[in-house]
Image (spheres, rainbow, N blue to C red):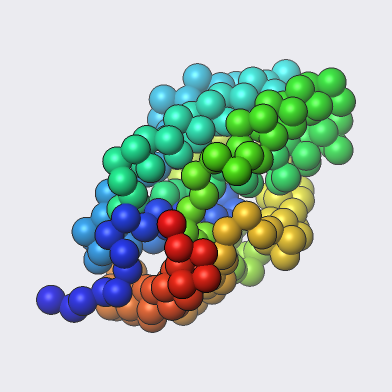
């Protein structure tokens, strides 16, 4: 068995736009490292379908729901003592999704301010546990759209392509300014989970280097 030099208490978060392959990489890394998984709760989300039907009516409700769920999940992972691969980070919501809806007029200024204040009070404190590393998945726009269509979620396929274009651009802007934890950028063409599962070994090597380096500088 290959030995991977990743601390057993590490928390690794995967970020990237919708359809880029976060869940698939989460499963693959968890299998390789014998880590637990933490997935975004999509199937039992009471607002998601409503949101795609009416952004203006449900954007605030959806963001509050995600914030609460992600906060609980972040606590759970660290209470377990780490050893998790996490599908999507808590940091993306405020700077990408909520801000986009506020600027597009599908979330009121008052709702955005309320949401942002709550986010800051919950997350932007020295006591909030941060991931050891964030893997940012990069791709071109056409690949993302192809993956969304292949996944076959009707609510996503029926969404105006302009929404996905705005989201894609915002993710690119967001990661260039993100500094809450160390980042490893990975292009989805660097590995193939189906034809060559071992191709993610080079992704793991990048993660290991970043975690080891950061823990030498800032040990827990």
Indicate the position of residue 22 as horizontal and vertical percent values.
46, 55
Looking at this view, is 211 or 140 the one in front?
Answer: 211
Indicate the position of residue 8 as horizontal and vertical percent values.
27, 59
Residue 195 appears in the figure: no
Side of 91 where 216 appears, left or right: left
Residue 60 appears in the figure: yes
Residue at image point 71% right, 46% down: 96
Residue at image point 28% right, 49% down: 36
Residue at image point 51% right, 33% down: 71
Indicate the position of residue 178 as horizontal and vertical percent values.
68, 58
Side of 220 where 99 appears, left or right: right
Looking at this view, is 40 or 81 the one in front?
Answer: 81
Side of 61 where 110 appears, left or right: right
Give the position of the N terminus as an image quadrant.
bottom left
Above or below, 183 against 12 in this view is below
Indicate the position of residue 157 as horizontal and vertical percent values.
58, 43
Side of 67 where 172 appears, left or right: right
Residue at image point 68% right, 26% down: 118
Above or below, 110 against 136 in this view is above
Above or below, 34 against 192 in this view is above
């Amino acid at each position: 068995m290959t030995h991977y030099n990743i601390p057993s208490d590490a928390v690794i978060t995967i970020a990237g736009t919708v359809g880029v392959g976060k869940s698939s990489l989460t499963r693959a890394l968890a299998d390789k490292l014998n880590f637990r998984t933490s997935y975004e709760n999509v199937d039992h989300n009471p607002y998601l379908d409503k949101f795609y039907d009416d952004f203006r009516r449900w954007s605030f409700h959806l963001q509050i729901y995600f914030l609460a769920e992600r906060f609980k999940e972040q606590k759970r992972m660290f209470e377990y003592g780490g050893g998790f691969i996490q599908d999507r980070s808590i940091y993306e919501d405020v700077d990408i999704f909520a801000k986009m809806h506020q600027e597009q007029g599908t979330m009121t200024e008052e709702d955005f301010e309320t949401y942002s204040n709550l986010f800051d009070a919950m997350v932007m404190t020295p006591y909030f546990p941060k991931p050891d590393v964030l893997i940012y998945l990069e791709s071109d726009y056409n690949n993302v759209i192809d993956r969304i269509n292949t996944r076959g979620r009707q609510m996503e396929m029926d969404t105006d392509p302009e929404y996905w274009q705005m989201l894609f651009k915002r993710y690119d802007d967001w990661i260039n300014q993100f500094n809450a934890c160390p980042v490893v950028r990975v292009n989805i063409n660097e590995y193939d989970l189906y034809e060559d599962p071992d191709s993610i070994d080079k992704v793991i090597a990048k993660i290991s280097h970043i975690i080891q380096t950061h823990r030498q500088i800032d040990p827990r």
